[in-house]
Amino acid sequence: MGRKHSFMDREFRTPAFDADDGGDFEKNLVFVIMPFRGIEMTEVYAAVQDECRKLRLNTRRADEYAGSGFVIREVVELIERAEFIVCDLTDERPNVYYELGYAHGVGNENMDILLVAKAGTELHFDIAPLRVQFYTSAEHLRTIVSSSLKAMIRATRQ
């Protein structure tokens, strides 16, 4: 993302926050942070992909790279390059929490990240205060992704 301030600088209004620092990113790139296992998560990713495609946004997920590359480097690069991040907190996966923390640390702000989780997901202490939208089905998730990304685009591309 390439901002000189972090998510926390903005949220806690520290002197490091610079409202004029829009960051560096690849326009229309959406990095999806999520658990990979199970048919249900395959349907979830398909729903996110479809809704992004309708908005002319390109999705990427870490497991889409070919070969034996260094996965964490690819994840870090995608987090830093993406204009938007969709983060699914379902199943409380440590890698998802780690990647979200990194995204906040490199300057992604609240209107850069969409947090979602399947209804019934328990959120850990440090994530619980954040706005997370809970979905009940892949179809419900489609509605959340579409409306949220439209609002995020309006807010960040002024």
Image (cartoon, grey):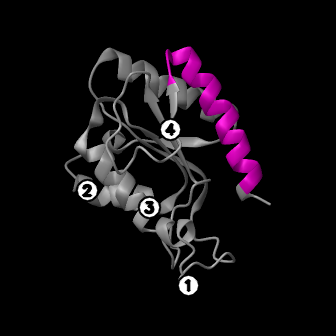
- Say which mark, if any, is on residue 132: 4
Circle 2 SS class: helix
* Residue 136 among those drawn in magenta: yes
Determine whether label 2 and label 3 are within 8 Å by CB.
no
Amino acid tagged 1: Pro
Whether residue 49 is situated above or below residue 29 in the rendered picture: above
Amino acid tagged 4: Val
Q: Nearer the viewer, mark 2 or mark 3?
A: 3
Q: For the residue carrying disc 2, how many other residues have a C-alpha within 10 Å: few (<14), some (14-19), or many (20+)?
A: few
**Precedes in sequence: disc 1 or disc 4:** 1
| Front position in the image: 93 or 64 | 93
Quarter-of-image position of residue 77: bottom left
Q: Nearer the viewer, mark 4 or mark 3?
A: 4
Magenta part of the chain: 135-155
What is the quadrant of the C terminus in the image?
bottom right
**Precedes in sequence: disc 4 or disc 3:** 3
Circle 4 SS class: loop
Query: Left or right: 88 with respect to 48?
Result: left
**Precedes in sequence: disc 1 or disc 3:** 1
Find residue 75 and report its horizontal and vertical position in percent: 34, 54
Determine whether label 4 and label 2 are within 8 Å by CB.
no
What is the spatial separation of the Cα atoms under label 1 and label 4, in whole angstroms?
Answer: 27 Å
**Precedes in sequence: disc 2 or disc 3:** 2
Find residue 135 and report its horizontal and vertical position in percent: 51, 22
**Precedes in sequence: disc 4 or disc 2:** 2
Answer whether residue 128 is visible to the viewer in this image: yes
- Say which mark, if any, is on residue 104: 3
Residue of label 2: 72
